[in-house]
Image (cartoon, rainbow, N blue to C red):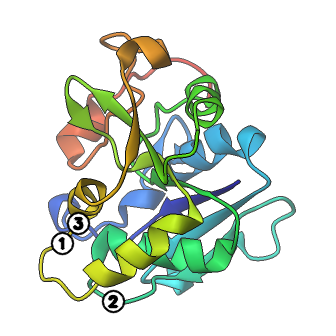
Amino acid sequence: MIAAVLAKGGSARLGGACKPLVAWRGRPLIEHVLAAAAPCVARSLVVTAAPEVFAHFAGRSGGPEVIADAARDAGPLGGLLAALDHAGSEPVLLLGCDMPRLTTPVIRRILHAVGSEPATVPLIGGMPQPLCAVYGPGVRPVLAGLMGERRAGLRALLDRLAVRWLDEAALGYHPGCGWFDDVDTWEAIGALPKGGPA
């Protein structure tokens, strides 16, 4: 199992700031996600359209490898395709860079639940969480077929797959835990809990 964290560069909602590198509790958002995944996987990737922005990871002992998206302007589909190509026969734990409250225990629950289906995806409040999900190598042909479709996204991919859905009870989810909350605005970043460890 490898983890692949999707990390684009500048964010329009953040006035052009590089969202993965915005700090919370003394560390960039992306580093919180990488740290949560690290104990659960053999290795980690940062998948991005701007590899130069994340060049500081190069040479870091135990750090992630930085790879480029499979296609520019393909969004998360391009990132997932690049990760699957890089992983070969290994499944990929796909993660967004902006879920800093994600924890190692919930990632372990997701991985423990992986079965024969090509995708294993949390379903919280009836909403799929495709950016905290596991995709097997069998996803690749379906994904490749979607790459040419305008405005296709991960939801469209899930519609074409057999999915193992994990509900709140399966994950031990409770309101307020914030595991799957993504932060897309300065307001959301400012609303993150201030206390606790860095």
Q: Can residue 97 be seen from the camera position used here?
A: yes
Q: Is residue 140 above or below residue 34?
A: below
Binning the other alpha carbons within 10 Å of mark 1 as few (below 14), some (14 to 19) or many (20 upward) gives: some
Q: Position of residue 155 (x, y in %)?
A: 22, 56
Amino acid marked by disc 3: Gly
Q: Which mark is residue 152?
A: 1
| Front of the two marks 1 and 2 | 1
Task: Name the residue located 36 percent from the left edge and 73 percent from the top edge.
Answer: 142
Q: Earlier in the sequence, mark 1 or mark 2?
A: 2
| Front of the two marks 3 and 2 | 3
Quadrant of image for the C terminus: top right
Q: Earlier in the sequence, mark 3 or mark 2?
A: 2
Quadrant of image for the N terminus: bottom right
The residue wearing badge 2 is: 72
The residue wearing badge 3 is: 153
Image side of residue 190 versus residue 150, left or right:
right
Task: Name the residue located 45 percent from the left edge and 54 percent from the top edge.
Answer: 97
Task: Name the residue located 12 percent from the left edge and 75 percent from the top edge.
Answer: 151
The Cα–Cα distance between marks 3 and 2, rounded to whole angstroms, is 14 Å
